[in-house]
Image (cartoon, rainbow, N blue to C red):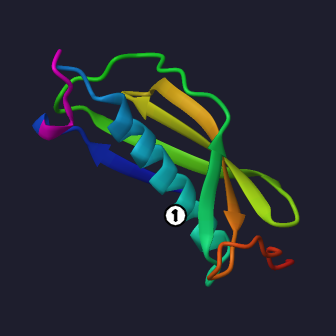
Amino acid sequence: MENHRLVLPGHMNQYGFLFGGYLLAWVDEMAWMAASRDYPGCQLVTVGMKEVAFKKSVREGAVLRFEALRARTGETSATYSVKVSKDGEEIFSTEVTLVRVDGEGRKQSLPKG
């Protein structure tokens, strides 16, 4: 799955660079969207990100490209590789693991297939 995001003035930190928290939220959202397309109707929540290391800074006006691919599937969870690039250069990547839960927050098996 691929998506894009425009970095706006409200996304900047006090030094004029993209605030890392926004990028992490967008990465989490991207992983959730990819998982929701793979497992429609399932309630999925993020349980972890493998690594958080920003490789390049980002300024206002940049258009970021997000790509999410399913990396692994377990009994109750799925892990997605999420890469973020700007002008063809990778600025961030990580793996996001989501788990299927019921209305009470208990883990549930993912559908087979």
Q: Position of residue 103 (x, y in %)?
A: 62, 82
* Residue under the image location 41 percent in, 16 percent down: 56
SS for callout 1: helix
Residue 86 horizontal side relative to residue 13, left or right: right
* Residue under the image location 59 percent in, 71 percent down: 36
Could you classify mark 1 by the number of other residues whose Cα lies within 10 Å: few (under 14), some (14-19), or many (20 or more)? some
| Quadrant in the picture for the C terminus | bottom right
Question: Which of 43 and 88 lies nearest the eye of the viewer?
Answer: 43
Range of the magenta residues? Answer: 10-15
* Residue under the image location 31 percent in, 46 percent down: 5
Asked if the magenta segment contains residue 7, the reply would be: no
Q: Quadrant of residue 50?
A: top right
Question: Which of 106 and 75 lies nearest the eye of the viewer?
Answer: 106
Q: Which residue is mark 1?
A: 33
Q: Position of residue 88 (x, y in %)?
A: 44, 28
Residue 99 horizontal side relative to residue 61, left or right: right
Q: What main secondary structure does the magenta stretch of the protein show?
A: loop
- The amino acid type found where label 1 is placed reads Met
